[in-house]
Amino acid sequence: MSEELLGINDLHVSFSTRRGMVEAVRGVTLSVEKGEMLGLVGESGSGKSVTGFATTRLLDAAGRVTGGKILFRGQDVTKLRGDDLRQLQGAAMSMIFQNPRAALNPIRAIGLQIADAILTHKKISKDAARAETLELLCAVQIRDPETRMNAYPHELSGGMCQRVMIAIAISCNPALLIADEPTTGLDVTTQKVVMDLLADIAAARGMATILITHDLGLAARYCRRIAVMERGRIVEEASPKKLFSAPQHAYTRRLVAASPTATSRIEDLVTEEERERHATIVSKPRQQLPHGTPPLLEVRKLAKRFDQGSAAVADFSMTMAGGESVGLVGESGSGKSTTSRMICRLIDPSEGDIVFDGQSIGHVASRDFHRSPLRKDIQMVFQDPNESLNPRFTAFDCIAHPLMRLDGMRAADALRKRVEECAERVGLPLDLLPRFPHQLSGGQKARVGIARAIACRPRLLVLDEPTAALDVSVQAVVLQLLDRLRRENDIALLFVSHDLNVVRMLCDRTIVLRNGGIVEQGESRALFDNPKTDYTRKLVEAIPHIETGPALAAAL
Amino acid sequence: MLSYILRRIVSTLPVMAIVALFVFSLLYIAPGDPAVVIAGDQASPEDVERIRQGLGLDRPFLIQFGSWVWRILHGDLGTSIFTSLPVSAMIGQRLGPTLSLMTVTLLLTIVVAVPLGVVAAWKAGSFIDRAIMAFAVFGFSLPVFVVGYVLAYIFALELEWLPVQGYTPLTEGFWPWLQNLILPSIALGCVYIALIARITRATMLEVLQQDYIRTARAKGLGQGGILFVHALKNAAVPIVTVIGIGIALLIGGAVVTESVFAIPGLGRLTIDAILRRDYPVIQGIVLLFSFVYVLVNLMIDVVYTLVDPRIRY
């Protein structure tokens, strides 16, 4: 029907590291037709980004194409040099990246950055380039483009930065655009806006797109064809419908199972084979608390104002019973992290009170709270397991530290026993305890973070996007772990997330925040199935769903 | 922007006040009675007392300080004990050579060191990188006077390309002026070239790792555009900082260099004044150098805001 634009043939890419050559891509064969949007899906380390970088010739100095061909319009990209290469880069083929704010030069006005791309490839005057820049900013729907041209990246939101990146990428009307995790790190509503924009632009300009993502749902929503990568190879290639209803390869099956959907439960997140293996740890239902038990946590009219006066959080009240799990959702900037940090007593509220187990803790200054006996009852799991572990502490030190500080545990034997107990609890192999964070995988680091948090046997665990930096299969395991901890140890969970599918599975109740205030709250499933406010509806609709069930069966 | 600069100038006032107090106290901290020193060996106690009263040394400390500051604000730095000339005139005479030496050295340093650092970072790990860094280590480890004498021996005595010593004012022509400054500037600049090349390389290496450099490559920008438009400007803040610190260090280096090349600058004046315990001259020079240093820092702060829009003013 249509002709091939890009043909990758048995591509091999290796990186030279201290431990010798590491093969990141081992024989990828892929083809992209003109104007098509192809999804390239896989977990971290699968080689999907490396494939993208090899195609656009942006590999690090350590990376090298060791075999195969990348044919773009019949020309082997891997053999291009000098001017031929630069004529390709940014002109015929362009790329947008994860973390748009970092991908833009922080000290150059965005208008100039777009004009750079135009002036590199077209012999036109600066004024003409400026006019084109303005058109591009309009095309990516940036309001008030005249003023925004002079803005710097730090003055724009993440979503806007990504639009600027898109403007740069499409500035010379490329035939192929490679989008590497373009919306990871943006909240769901922004993700939808950016992806819709990208899809529209690609369709309008007849541009072929490769969408590289770890999010199967996202790929399914925007691509007609999805290629799944695992450990440097493409293991399966199919339409989204086929991929979800009848995944062929074991890895695809695992990935599909681990991707949360609107209806999935925590138990569903692993494939059936795996479920059988873990059949023994079917969790017992939580026992109902007798009526009239005082709440574990009560937050009254909490507010936080930062220097400039406008409130980040205002009039926030909630209660939590022991062992309950509550989700706190909202877009970035809605005040959910600020709220969770106030409850953890890491920052001081401007107004209101926090009552934990009958004691008012809202007025204890946050920098003195570490001396409070309640410190060990309220613990936190942070967003990025890479950043929140001390790189000079071994996993053991990490878990042992709060025990020594908060429980006053000194005896080496007892300490070792407790640390090992915690590690076992979170499924961290004991032989990993002497390792430093950089020697652990993302999932293992997440477990260390959770083990550290539960070491002192807290009664409330506050989790700030604990799975946002993790692959779906690791996320599935971590979620199951959290759910088990809650049921077996009766730990209450306050779960801050922008991933509504995850909140729906894990949390009994959900609170929706917007601009620092509560918009809606209620029992999770009811809230998501029948949102009462437009805002919640918008959030729910923005989740890339994987259509399953009767509609899909009929289509096949 | 203007209000920022004004605010910065105002904020340097306390610094200058503290420096002034310190400089003034030199007279008291230093061993020996200034009046005795001035009077000389053969003076009678009456002579000493007369001199003390003449200098106002018998009045309370704060009053002395106050009237000293008042005089300085009116441009009166006092009179040299040794030559009986006004200190401001003595400094004025010697300012030209030192300023010339420092300016030429600074320009030479920046023009040589920054490109060296950029090239080293761009070709990191290659032979060129290693050669530049080896040179940097070499430049670090050689004292100014060694480099100075070696240069003077090779280029002045053996090859006779440049004059051995001395100084010609700029008013007598650009080339004669520059001729006399080339060797001293290279000798003095060696350490700073090494230092700034290293800092430039380290900062550039970090900047070249950043995502936006990959974006620049993705746009198809040439190597020059990437290195100088996108990378170097992002690396500028640490480099400018080190250049600023370098200027402060140059003041010390200039003293030694001027001795080696017999340049009649402030460095020589300082040494002479210290040897003669000529306190008014020492005070004047220290005050001037402090003022220059504060001014340089002010300029660096302004440059920061020009380079990086994220630094708010």
Image (cartoon, coloured by chain):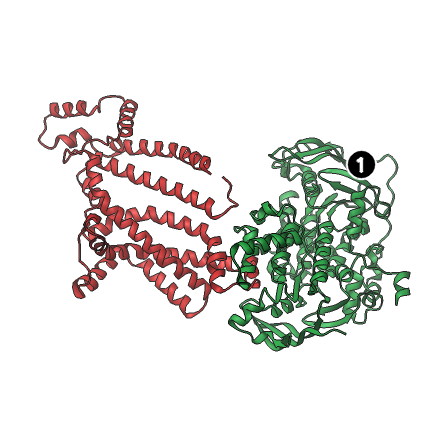
The residue lying at 67 percent from left, 63 percent from top is A44
Q: Which lettered chain is shown in red? A: B
Specify the subunit that label 1 lies on: A
In the picture, measured across the screen, residue A49 lies left or right of residue B234, that is right
Position of residue A201 relative to residue A147, above or below, is below
Q: Which lettered chain is shown in green? A: A
What x and y, as percent, mark residue A170?
A: 63, 60
Q: Amino acid at mark 1?
A: Pro
Which quadrant would residue B45 be assigned to in this image?
A: top left
Which residue does the numbered mark 1 point to in the structure image? A295
What x and y, as percent, mark residue A143?
A: 65, 46
Residue toward you, B207 or A431 = B207
Would you say residue A325 is visible in this rendering? no
Which quadrant would residue A268 be assigned to in this image?
A: bottom right
Q: Quadrant of the N terminus of chain A?
A: bottom right
What x and y, as percent, mark residue A12?
A: 63, 75
Residue toward you, B188 or B173 = B173
Would you say residue A302 is visible in this rendering? yes
Q: Quadrant of the C terminus of chain A?
A: bottom right
Residue toward you, B275 or A75 = A75
